[in-house]
């Protein structure tokens, strides 16, 4: 009997993304501010982390084909990038002398939109992986069923 740890991997990935986000903000703005930011955007940050965790769990539960690896890398990168973009304006405020403080203002203004892009990316990734997993199950049933054409 093969153990399937895909749910565990998914949970660790989702929690890991939350910890990563809190760590980045805490490093530059303090722990209290990190939790305040999490509380103000929880309705976007939690779905992003949950969607990322679901993707990792699905990926762990299916055969690792090049197509699915590419899907996970693409959508996972967008999810992580959205989370970083959400928090990066805090980093950019540290270096106004580089002339990118205007970019920080744009990131802050469109913070929810960046998170929504990540959530949409998660939905696309989850649907692609779910369809792939469903197709794998159908193929396995056909192989086990011994369906064969006799002429």
Image (spheres, rainbow, N blue to C red):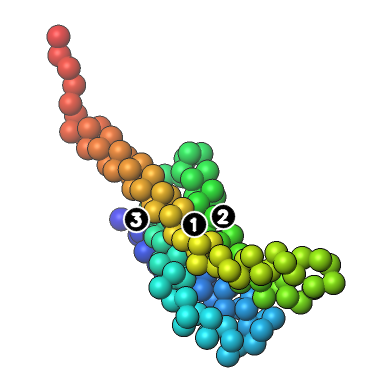
Vertical position of residue 119 compared to residue 31: above or below: above
Residue 48 left/right relative to 140: right
The residue at the far bottom in this view is: 32
Is residue 145 among what the camera can see? yes
* Quadrant location, the N terminus: bottom left
Q: Which residue is found at the position 43% from the left and 50% from the top?
A: 125
- Residue 56, quarter of picture: bottom left
Q: Which residue is found at the position 50% from the left and 51% from the top?
A: 75
Q: Which residue is mark 3?
A: 2
The mark that comes first in sequence, 3 or 2, is: 3
Closer to us: 78 or 96? 96
Give the spatial CA distance, label 3 vs label 2: 30 Å
Q: Are marks 3 and 2 in contact (CB under 8 Å)?
A: no
Q: Which residue is mark 2?
A: 77
> Which numbered dot is residue 117?
1
Give the spatial CA distance, label 3 vs label 1: 36 Å
Secondary element at tag 2: helix
> Which numbered dot is residue 149?
none
The mark that comes first in sequence, 2 or 1, is: 2
Give the spatial CA distance, label 2 vs label 1: 11 Å
Please tell me whether mark 2 or mark 1 is closer to you in this view: 1
- Residue 42, quarter of picture: bottom left
Vertical position of residue 107 compared to residue 149: above or below: below
Secondary element at tag 3: loop
């Amino acid at each position: 009997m093969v153990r399937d740890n895909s749910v565990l991997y998914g949970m660790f990935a989702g929690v890991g993304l939350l910890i990563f986000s809190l760590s980045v903000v805490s490093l530059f703005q303090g722990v209290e501010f990190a939790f305040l930011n999490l509380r103000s955007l929880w309705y976007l940050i939690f779905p992003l982390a949950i969607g990322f965790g679901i993707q990792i769990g699905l990926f762990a539960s299916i055969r690792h084909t090049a197509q699915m690896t590419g899907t996970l890398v693409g959508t996972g990168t967008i999810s992580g990038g959205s989370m970083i973009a959400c928090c990066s304006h805090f980093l950019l405020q540290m270096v106004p002398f580089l002339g990118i403080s205007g970019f920080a203002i744009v990131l802050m203004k469109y913070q929810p939109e960046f998170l929504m892009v990540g959530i949409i990316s998660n939905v696309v990734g989850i649907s692609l992986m779910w369809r792939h997993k469903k197709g794998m199950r159908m193929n396995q049933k056909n192989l086990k069923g011994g369906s064969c054409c006799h002429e």
